[in-house]
Amino acid sequence: QVQLVESGGRLVQAGGSLRLSCAASGRTFSNSAMGWFRQAPGKEREFVAAISWSGSITYYADSVKGRFTISRDNAKNTIYLQMNSLKPEDTAVYYCAAARSSVYVGPAMSRYNYWGQGTQVTVSS
């Protein structure tokens, strides 16, 4: 079992920055690839970014590429999502997720079997 707790979400103005954190506990965190997803009101949950167990491989949705950076600190059992140049369309609940695989780095939600409760990010125009 893996427990995931996101934090760092808040209200921010367009053009601003935020860093989200996801603290993991339970089974060995460093064996899992991890991902960030988001869900805006009235929309389906969508992939944002993913990172392999070692941190050497990352993958981003086109909508955030160049603005968001995913990273991890296995010693702290934590992953991060640095979000820069935020836009109103980034407003959503952001979820972190742990993959079944140590190396899967991709958008398929079915490949992630543990999810956090989410943290709200609101970007005002």
Image: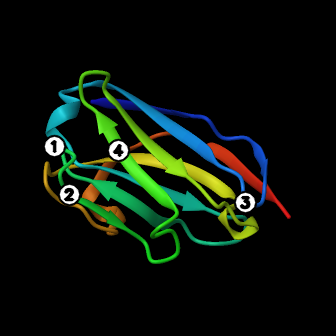
The furthest residue to the bottom? 62
Amino acid under disc 4: Ser
Is residue 117 among the parts visible in the rendering?
Answer: no
Q: What distance separates the C-alpha of mark 4 from that of mark 3?
A: 21 Å
Identity, as a three-letter code, of the amino acid under mark 3 = Gly
Residue at the image position 43 percent from the left and 72 percent from the top: 61
**Point 73% across, 41% down: residue:** 10
Question: Marks 1 and 4, how far apart in space?
Answer: 10 Å
Image quarter of residue 4: top left
Name the secondary structure under disc 2: loop
Compared with 16, 59 (above or below) is below
Q: How far apart are marks 2 and 4 (CA)?
A: 10 Å
- The answer to whether residue 18 is above or below residue 42 is above
Q: Label 2 to label 1, Cα distance in Å?
A: 8 Å
Pointer 1 residue: 54
Q: Residue at x 70, y 60 (%)?
A: 91
